[in-house]
Structure formats: structure tokens, C-alpha cells
Image (cartoon, rainbow, N blue to C red):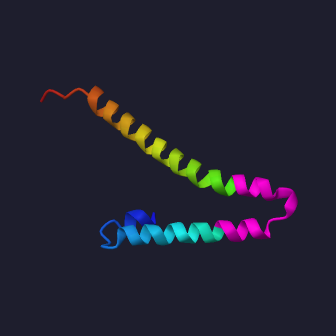
């Protein structure tokens, strides 16, 4: 959502670097406070989940776009 709201922002690349740094800092902090028994689960979850959510959102948008284009292609013009 923040990417959409800042599309016209002149420092877009620097903003993306800041997001990446915040994500890395968060991941490091969560891994360091995780108990030893679930550390592997935490590492896998915080590594895979953001990517999976992004891919799912992209796939959902693509599917919705395809359905819209199919609907407009199958609608026949009405005769006046």
C-alpha cells in the first residue's frame, strides 16, 4: 500500500532501500529473541511469508484482470 501511495515520490529508490533495511532489522530482532526450539520455524516463516503474500497478491490481480477482459470480450453489443 505504501508503494502505491508513494508512486510519484521523487526518492522512490531510496524509500525502497529504507523498507528493505527496516525489514532486515525486524527479521534480525525477531530471530534473536525467538526461543531455540522454534528458531528454524521463525526463520522460515519470516523469510517465506512476505514473498508468498506478494506473489499471491500479484496472482490475484492477474486473475482478476483476466476475468474482466474475458467478460468484456464475451459481452455482445446491443442493437438499438
Using the image, determine if residue 66 lies above or below residue 18: above
Name the one closer to the observer, 5 or 52.
Answer: 52
Quarter occupied by the C terminus: top left
Which quadrant of the figure has residue 34? bottom right
Q: For residue 29: magenta?
A: yes
Q: Position of residue 28 (x, y in %)?
A: 68, 68
In this rendering, would 62 be left or right of 46?
Answer: left
Residue pictured at 78% horizontal, 70% vertical: 33
Residue pictured at 62% horizontal, 71% vertical: 25
In this rendering, would 33 be left or right of 12?
Answer: right
Quarter occupied by the N terminus: bottom left
What number of labels is visible?
A: 0
Q: Position of residue 17 (x, y in %)?
A: 46, 69
In this rendering, would 39 be left or right of 70?
Answer: right
Q: Which residues are magenta?
A: 27-44
Q: Position of residue 32 (x, y in %)?
A: 76, 69
Using the image, determine if residue 10 lies above or below residue 66: below
Using the image, determine if residue 43 lies above or below residue 67: below
In this rendering, would 43 be left or right of 36?
Answer: left
Q: Position of residue 46 (x, y in %)?
A: 66, 57
Residue pictured at 29% horizontal, 26% vertical: 74
Which quadrant of the figure has residue 39? bottom right
Using the image, determine if residue 21 lies above or below residue 47: below
Q: For residue 40: magenta?
A: yes
Name the one closer to the observer, 68 or 56.
Answer: 56
Residue pictured at 43% horizontal, 37% vertical: 63
Seen from this angle, which residue lies furthest right? 37
Which SS does the magenta portion mostly show? helix
Amino acid at each position: 500500500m505504501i508503494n502505491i501511495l508513494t508512486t510519484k515520490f521523487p526518492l522512490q529508490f531510496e524509500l525502497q532501500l529504507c523498507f528493505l533495511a527496516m525489514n532486515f532489522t525486524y527479521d534480525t530482532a525477531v530471530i534473536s529473541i525467538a526461543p531455540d526450539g522454534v528458531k528454524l520455524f521463525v526463520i522460515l516463516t519470516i523469510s517465506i511469508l512476505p514473498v508468498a503474500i506478494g506473489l499471491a497478491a500479484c496472482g490475484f490481480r492477474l486473475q482478476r484482470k483476466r476475468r474482466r477482459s474475458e467478460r468484456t470480450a464475451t459481452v455482445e453489443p446491443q442493437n438499438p
